Image (tube, rainbow, N blue to C red):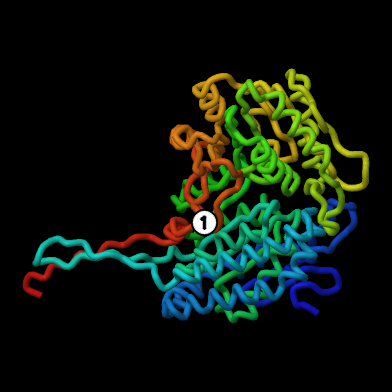
Amino acid sequence: MNPFIADGLARNFIAGEWVEGDGGAVIAVTDPGCEEHVADCAQASEQSLARALDAARATFERGDLADMKPAARARLMMRIAGEIRGIAAEGGDILCRESGKTLAAAQDEFEEAAQYFEYYGGVADKIEGKSIPLGPDYADYTVYEPYGVSAQIVPWNFPVSIAARSLAPALAAGNSVIVKSPELDPIGLAMLGLAFERAELPAGAVSILNGIGREIGAKLVQSPQIDQIVFTGSVPTGQSILRDAAGPVTPSLMELGGKSAAVVFEDADLDTLIASLRSGIFFNAGQVCSAMSRVLVQRSIYERAVEYAAEMAGGLSVGHGLGNPDHTPVISAAQLRAVEEIASTARQDGARVVIGGARLERLGHFMAPTILADVDAASRAAQEEIFGPVACMTPFDTEAEAIAMANGTEFGLVAGVFTRDLARAHRLARKLRAGQVFVNEWFAGGIATPFGGVGKSGFGREKGLEALYNYVRTKNIAISLRGA
């Protein structure tokens, strides 16, 4: 029996131990594909948080990671990666049932988590400063130092991989980390504690708390023991965290979602477009911050593109994630209501519902794969993040019009261009307001490519070598050699 879950109760991982919490409060976890109870999670209390904070601070002050030889820290990261792969089969099954995603996607999250630890393990011994020439009478150099204790709040759409995305560079740099898991699907993420335990990560270097955001999450970011905040989630929650961070001036890294547009020109390959649309908006039931939620198509091919999109959406298989269908449920009844409501509003605002537009009448929280055509660029459906399987299609005539529409929201996470004209692709990539631009393939890139947004999509970068420097501070040391 795994120590993290017994008798249907998942525990918190605090200071290297599995803890039930104080007071006996639990979070009930439900399978969104069949609405059955999966397990209960011990709800972290203020006492649990205090213990995690004290352990993280003590681990950092002792230098358990920061003072470890970089090569040894790199080997530790590689061991963690191996242990994550060792729990991927069991963890994937749990994550599939608690999140609703396909079993294959859930297992892929654990594989991606392992790859994050391998990637940043490979650079843990290469965090190098530089020498700055000031003349013969001086020696001047920079060093990179970890922040200390990093508070990381993880969303429910990709809890395991997003946790690893921030955990791995933070640990590679020598920080201690406290993770607040999402209350809708916390169990798969809690399993990462097994990998840390088996890899012999210093106790206290990572704690994983299963708690309510407005309670434990808020107290975590408000703690004076926190040196850095990393948050992925909604704009309102991010704004609330930033207000809390303003008082102590806690450095923060924010990834807050998007309303990303693909700009499709008349010379684009429509088969390529539809393949990207399939994954871009229907993968994980559209619950992806960088989803291909808006599709702007040049008018000469617009109706054909709408027809192809509807044909693709209508051919998707639907079912519980364990069967690896094309289309799975959204995370909860509340999320289903929110997605269905905005699709209904789009119809009232003049959009044409080509296919879908409402929930599916079956057990579970299933929204029909939806294609909305003729969506007004200023309407709610085109401006607000839907976070569901709804693609909004809009025609355009000129390149300038397309750029204005693509940039015409408060978000700026990713964008896309579909064209055979490489000069135009480069030109559009420069003009689109986004942290990442895909050309002819949505979701191109990977762990090595920096990810983050502008505007209300947040600030800072995750992934790639650039992310590593979000988890360290630069210190300059200037030495006068005169009379030394």
Label 1 environment density (alpha carbons within 10 Å; few <14, some 14–19, many ≥20): many
Which residue is located at x 74 percent, y 73 percent? 4
Which residue is located at x 75 percent, y 68 percent? 91
Which residue is located at x 39 percent, y 70 percent? 126
Question: In the visual, does 17 lie left or right of 140?
Answer: right
Which residue is located at x 53 percent, y 29 percent? 407
Q: Is residue 477 above or below residue 356?
A: below
Query: Which residue, as the protein is rendered here, is positioned at the far right?
Result: 362
User: Label 1: which residue?
Assistant: 463
* Residue situated in front as seen by the camera: 333 or 442: 442
- On the question of residue 378 being in view, the answer is no
Asked which quadrant contains residue 31, the reply is bottom right
- On the question of residue 358 being in view, the answer is yes
Rendered-image quadrant of the C terminus: bottom left
Question: In the visual, does 402 lie left or right of 350?
Answer: left
- Name the amino acid type tagged 1: Lys
Residue 437 place in picture, x, y as percent: 52, 41
Residue 417 place in picture, x, y as percent: 55, 36
Question: In the visual, does 387 lie left or right of 403?
Answer: right
Q: Is residue 422 above or below residue 215?
A: above
* Residue situated in front as seen by the camera: 229 or 215: 229
Rendered-image quadrant of the N terminus: bottom right
Q: Is residue 214 above or below residue 136?
A: above
* Residue situated in front as seen by the camera: 391 or 69: 391
The count of marks equals: 1
Question: What secondary structure is found at the residue carrying circle 1?
Answer: loop
Asked which quadrant contains residue 413, the reply is top right
Residue 22 place in picture, x, y as percent: 74, 68
Residue 48 place in picture, x, y as percent: 66, 67
